Image: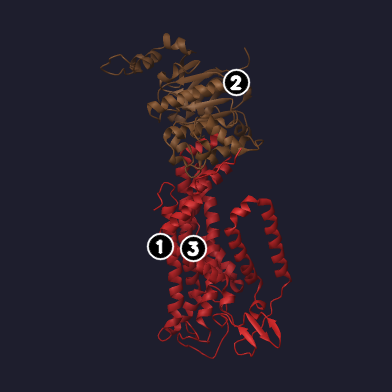
Amino acid sequence: MNTPVITSESYAHRIWRHLQADSYARNGIRIMILLFFVAALAPLLANSHAIVRVADGCVTFPAFESLDPIEWRFLFYVPLGALVCVCRHHFMSHPGRSASVLVGLVVLIELFIALYHPINDPSNDRDRPAEFKLMTPIPFSPTETTADQFSPPSWKHLCGTDSTGRDIASRMLHGARISLSVGFVSQGIALLIGIFFGSVAGYYRGWTDIGLSRFIEIIDCFPTLLLILVVVNFTGSKNNIFCIMAVIGLTSWTGIARLVRGEFLRLSALPFTLSAEALGATDFRIIIRHLLPNSLGPILVVGTFGVASAILMESSLSFLGFGIQAPTPSWGDILSEARRYIDFAWWLAFFPGLAILITIMSYNFVGEGLRDAVDPRMKVK
Amino acid sequence: MSAPLLHVENLGIHFGSGTDVVKAVDGISFDMQAGETLAVVGESGSGKSVTALALTRLLASPPARIISGKIEFEGRDVLRASEHELRSLRGKQIAYIFQEPSSSLNPVFTIGYQIREAIELHRPEVKDVEREIILALDRVGIREPAKRLGDYPHQLSGGMQQRVMIAMALACQPKLLVADEPTTALDVTIQKQIMDLLKDLKRSSNMAILLITHNFGLVSDFADRVVVMFRGRIVEAGPTAEVLRNPQHAYTQALIECVPKLGQKQHRLKVIDYAGIQ
């Protein structure tokens, strides 16, 4: 018997096609992908070390040598993820073999990173003589101070420099990683918590719902920004990026929980929930396989808007001086410094502000596109 | 006579509590044999759907409470069964089809996926699931089933959706099919097609069918026996032909009168006179 060909496309594919048909969402996605790659490859785009350097007859790769484990992981896993996405049909058709190949690759990468010690070389390759050198497009590292203080945008410093002569373009490229990872990770945390509480409250109703809803309302009553400031204050010197992500995530899940609860209340009253139950499905299965996919649309939409607001929140925190610690660049941090010199160094505020604006706008466009695309009854334009 | 497939005895189901109790089902008893077709007939609110859902304890509780009685399926006590036992009963032994096919199917999954779920839940031994899905669709008279697998519910007509529901219910080869007003949401020609399909399926398999309807017209050439429910009680029960020919209870008589007959001129449709019925 021939294996039948499934002619209709999958739900995810439909959503993708719909998004591609919407020009705002399409460009939003392009900007998101671009930002993602910029963030992942920042050390190879802006670095004081050369990518390749030939001197005294030996070839070295100084830019790679200075990478820390997290940067190595970015460098390996982003192409790997892209590869899996591109070849997903091949991977699906040989699940066993591809899984073992992937596990093998991951083990190799982790082994390499465990054995690797980054060389912390504060000097730069710009002025060092060499027979051949290939610098990164922006030949400054984000934390490197130079003698050019407050230099306005020029071909040498595309976005100018700040009070200690650090290159703003380089700081912004590296800052993209902080802003984007804060957006994604904190929203991921918020989604997990929000979906959990929302689905339990909406599916079980009754006292469970009453209890959880009051709990959500209590959490909602806290002034988020003040709460974050207090928590960040307590964590004090340990105040690192993961702490910021966790705090933003832990305070921004209530909207998602309410939305999921509402969706579950509506969906669980529909006959298909009863019919799944009559088929002998467990509560867990009904929640995960039947109700959650049906509410995925609205969840994705608020998730996208949530990423935008988390990026904004991180910028506000950094602006207030409670964000990422000093030498690490983030967009909010650059803005915060700009405040003091706004009367003459306009470029300090303009470029990070523009970056935040473009990022938030592209997320919001994608969010709005998703809102239309997730409805299976909508015709693709 | 062998032990019945389904034994319901003195079943009482109340909604709400305190002074606000509604006696939806008030002490009913009936038996079903394997392979038999039983029709439960009654108007809206007579407790027929509640009875059907109670067979596998699908009623949400609260507000529903089963306050008395016994339900036995193949000798097993349903009312004392654990959640785990209930799940292996639902779908596998007792399958349901409901009134609204359009909303009984999950709108975001293809019909092939939904039938696959039924098979994977209860028949893990099936190797070629794809083939089984196509067979299931073929059995309910869907043409070119292999091409329909990837269709979403909203792409199908109401009649096709109900066929998919039936295919899903039958995919697990249940011993009892509960059809809760399967044709109410469909127009008359589709109604006939679906009833013919159920009749064919009944002939080709030894499955018992519990048909729940308010329409005596559907019952006559379909069910072996009829149970008439009124206000949560069974007012009359017996072989279909006998009940139709010689209804004993005033309500049954009134219900049969309500079915308009072809070729008979009537100025007004008969309306049930509740005052005369007790």
Q: Is residue B235 above or below residue A46?
A: above
Of all chains, the one bearing label 2 is B
Which residue corresponds to the image point at 52% horizontal and 70% vertical from the top-left?
A179
Q: Label 2 sits on what residue type?
A: Leu
Mark 2, Cα crowd under 10 Å, few <14 / some 14-19 / many 20+, is some
Q: Nearer the viewer, mark 3 or mark 1?
A: 1
Residue, disc 3? A307
Between the C-alphas of marks 3 and 1, the distance is 18 Å
Q: Is residue A133 visible?
A: yes
Sort mark 3 into few (<14), some (14-19) or many (20+) by Cα contacts within 10 Å: many
Per the image, the residue denoted by label 1 is: A24
Chain B, chosen colour in render: brown
Residue hosting label 2:
B5
Chain for disc number 3: A
Left or right of residue B83: residue A110: right
Work out whether residue A255 or residue B189 is closer to the camera in this orientation and state it.
B189
For the point 44% across and 31% down, the residue is B99
* Local secondary structure at mark 2: loop
Subunit of label 1: A
Query: Between B130 and B50, which is closer to the camera in this rendering?
Result: B130
Q: Whole-Å distance between the Cαs marked 3 and 2?
A: 57 Å
**Amino acid type, mark 3:** Val
Q: Residue furthest front?
A: A2
Dot 1: what SS? Answer: helix
